[in-house]
Image: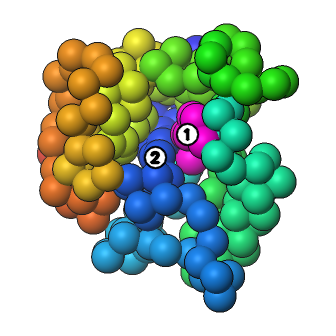
């Protein structure tokens, strides 16, 4: 458990939240959704550490090579550095019980399991009750709920319409920028 009660983090999925798909364009650029990059830059690094929390079904089922996703992550982190946005860590799980080859296995880090959040709690001494997950699938929301993390479902990407699980997020917003504004509003109200 966190030693300091306000060690907070914002977790977010890449696909459907920051961008349509975590894949570099032909010119090497990153296809951010409108306003997502700017919103990421508005999260106060003195209050929140930033974490990517992603289950990579595309890798598990052979649609994307692991090295291509690694190349994407390197470009993403470089872009974040250029924008002076500090990403504490990218947590990704390429495994699925029906995946292909070495990716065919169960993992506690695959959402809707809470493993990503529990690992971040251990590594960064987070207070998960003061953290947020911004996601677009019911697995994103359920994983965060299982870790007792605040949840915001965005209407971009799958917008919670994947039908995999029945969930009730704390908040539902149109997109990432609105989700960031909701976090800031909630935190401001909590401090007043």
The boundaries of the magenta stretch are 51-58
In the displayed structure, 85 sits above or below 56; it is below
For mark 2, what is the residue? 12
Which image quadrant for residue 163? Answer: top left
Q: Nearer the viewer, residue 33 or 169?
A: 33
Instruction: Decide: few, some or many residues near mark 1? Use Cα within 10 Å; few <14, some 14-19, many ≥20.
Output: many
Q: Position of residue 186 (x, y in %)?
A: 20, 45
In the displayed structure, 33 sits above or below 184; it is below
In the displayed structure, 109 sits above or below 120; it is above
Q: From where the camera sits, is residue 181 visible?
A: no
Which image quadrant for residue 19? Answer: bottom left
Left of 187 or right of it: where is 173?
A: left
* Badge 1 element: strand
Q: Residue at x 46, y 46 (%)?
A: 12
Q: Nearer the viewer, residue 29 or 84?
A: 29
Mark 2 or mark 1, which has the lower sequence index? 2
Label tally = 2
- CA gap between label 2 and label 1 equals 6 Å
For mark 1, what is the residue? 53
């Amino acid at each position: 458990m966190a030693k300091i009660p306000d060690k907070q983090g914002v977790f977010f999925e890449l696909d459907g939240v920051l961008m349509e798909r975590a894949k570099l364009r032909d010119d090497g650029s990153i296809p951010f959704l409108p306003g997502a990059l700017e919103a990421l830059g508005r999260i106060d690094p003195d209050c929140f550490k930033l974490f990517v929390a992603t289950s990579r079904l595309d890798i598990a089922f052979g649609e994307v090579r692991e090295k291509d996703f690694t190349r994407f992550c390197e470009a993403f982190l470089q872009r974040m550095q250029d924008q002076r946005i500090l990403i504490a860590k990218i947590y990704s799980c390429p495994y699925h019980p029906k995946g292909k080859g070495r990716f065919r296995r169960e993992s506690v880090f695959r959402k809707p399991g809470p493993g990503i959040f529990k690992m971040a709690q251990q590594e960064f001494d987070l207070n998960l009750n003061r953290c947020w997950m911004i996601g677009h699938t019911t697995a994103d929301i359920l994983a965060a709920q299982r870790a007792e993390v605040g949840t915001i479902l965005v209407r971009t990407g799958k917008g919670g319409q994947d039908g995999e699980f029945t969930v009730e997020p704390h908040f539902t917003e149109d997109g990432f920028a609105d989700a960031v504004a909701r976090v800031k509003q909630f935190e401001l109200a909590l401090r007043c």
